[in-house]
Image: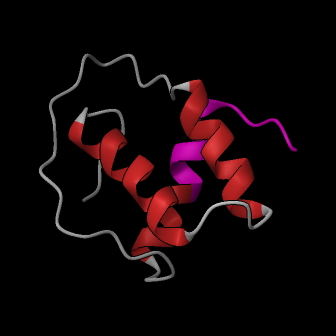
Amino acid sequence: MLDIDDNSFVQGIQYLIKQGIMKIPPTAQGTGTGSNQIPSWIKNNAGWWADGSIDDNSFVQGIQYLIKEGIMKIG
């Protein structure tokens, strides 16, 4: 699996959402702590999603967690 920093990961997911490639159900935006650190389980989910080990819905739930916690902002 390719290692990328947290900021690049967030930018990639934001791009997929903005382009309509990834659909995220309406999710309340959290305020967060400003750490913007992606939990390791989210990174694991991304790898499993990429290789087909988990479905889209499972991966999207992880992205919703990032939004709810304020780690990722969706404009």
x, y percent for residue 53: 73, 60
Q: Which stretch did the figure color magenta?
A: 1-12
**The C terminus lies in quadrant:** bottom left
x, y percent for residue 20: 43, 83
x, y percent for residue 11: 53, 51
Determine whether 51 is above or below 63 in the image.
Answer: below
* Camera-nearest residue between 48 and 37: 48
Q: Residue at x 17, y 57 (%)?
A: 27
Task: Specify the farthest residue to the right.
Answer: 1
Task: Specify the farthest residue to the bottom.
Answer: 20
Q: Residue at x 68, y 31 (%)?
A: 5
Q: Which colour assignment does the render follow?
A: secondary structure
**The N terminus lies in quadrant:** top right
Determine whether 50 is above or below 18 in the image.
Answer: above
17 magenta-colored: no
Q: Residue at x 53, y 70 (%)?
A: 56
